[in-house]
Image (cartoon, rainbow, N blue to C red):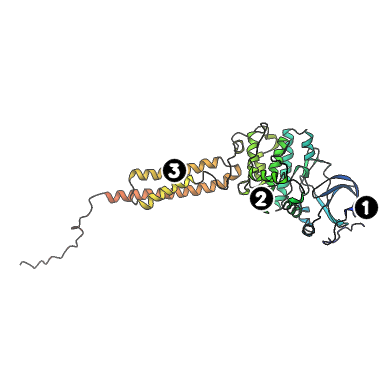
Amino acid sequence: MTASPHPAFDHQRAPDWEAFYKSFKKPGFVHGYEIVNKLGGGVFGVVYKARKESIGKAYAIKFLKVEDPSVRKEVLGELDGVSLFAQVDHPNLVSIEDKGVVEGIPYIVMGYAGDETLKSRIEGGGLSEQDALSLFVQVARGVQALHDHSLVHFDLKPANVFLKGDVARVGDYGLSKLITETAMSLTTGRGTPYYMAPEMLRRRGDHRSDIYSLGVILYECLTGGVPFTGDSEWEVLKGHEERSVEFPASVTPFHRALIERMLTKDPDGRIASVAEVLAALRSPEDLAVAPAGNWASKPAAPVTGHDQESWWPWVGILFAAWVVIRRPRPSGLLLLGAIAAVAWALWAFASRRKRAPPQSQRSASRTLWGWIAAGVVLLFLFGSLLAFGGLRSEGPEPTDRAREPIRPVDIHRGR
């Protein structure tokens, strides 16, 4: 049986892999393509190099393994919308050219991006730090292109990064349903989640999950291994959820801090965008030495969902408010203490802003101006109270007699 150019997906038909392996090398098995050789395989499918018969150009065809009937229906439905990913054109992304189904097996035709992967190059041990960072920047740019189109990869790993010389291209995207459903069914033994963000197990993945996976890839590029390992899938997942990242001495403080921010357990505390990652890295030429004063050159503070120092400035503000409310006419010493508390609160916030990532300082500046405005208002109130108190304190208090009304005098009395 051969595939038509765009056959309707039969959600009920089970995949026939026996028939596939008997016939896949026959001409016309996949309409318009001649399968040449196998490039690789994994949890989600098998990939073959193919030649387009009309023009002789090389492509890669991925045949998807979807055995679970309930997952299969959703995956095939999602494959109908893979054209959204096909519209993203970027030099660091493997292009999606076509889709189809043959012998009940869905497939995607992608641009051929080479036989080598980032994984094989890392395992080969011939990757210098400069080369590793150069390739990583390209991977991050490809992922950013997806995010700019509101698309998420969900399965980033070195095995899905294809290399042609020094050019890296991210592939195997557009299959989020297959990936997330498999991730939720780890007891099936399909894959070990070395690159999976903790929130993926709670079905809460979004673009920040890709940033977490990029952090693992950067770690592997620089160290040759993944940050969390174990004897089972669940041990690896427990590491992602609970353990801190340990670094060899070869990793610079700059890259250590950047990776820690990318691997923050809570996605709300994680670096918010790939653009911020690229901004921190600047460019491959500048990565040999961390820029002086760069935020990532300092150890990253643990993130618990709230800044551990964020409540201190409020102490000063609350103290100042107490003075205004409870002491309408404060003494000079108490007033001076309130003003000092407001000034200290503003200084504390400004100090934290200096430690923030460059991309976060713009929003911090807006908040800082809000604090300054609040401080100015409070200082104005303090000044007004002081001036009002000073005016009222001039001269003696009026006596009760002085407050009595003047009685009229009868000028005719006594004549």
Which residue in the protein does label 3 denote?
343
Instruction: Give residue 348's mark.
Output: none
Where on the picture, by quarter, is residue 215? top right
Residue 213 x %, y %: 70, 45
Circle 1 sits in a helix, a strand or a loop, which is it? helix
Which residue in the protein does label 1 denote?
23
In the image, what residue type sits under mark 2?
A: Glu
Circle 2 sits in a helix, a strand or a loop, which is it? helix
Disc with the residue nearer the chain's start (2 vs 1): 1
Task: Note whether 227 is above or below 398 in the view shown.
Answer: above
Picture quarter with the N terminus? bottom right
Can residue 205 be spotted in the picture?
A: no
Q: CA distance from mark 2 to mark 1?
A: 41 Å
Whether residue 43 sits left or right of residue 226 in the image: it is right
In the image, what residue type sits under mark 3?
A: Ala
x 80%, y 59%: residue = 69
Q: CA distance from mark 2 to mark 3?
A: 40 Å
Q: Who is closer to the viewer here, 374 or 153?
A: 153
Circle 3 sits in a helix, a strand or a loop, which is it? helix
Which residue in the protein does label 2 denote?
199
Residue 365 x %, y %: 54, 46
Q: Who is closer to the viewer here, 358 or 159?
A: 159
Q: CA distance from mark 3 to mark 1?
A: 78 Å
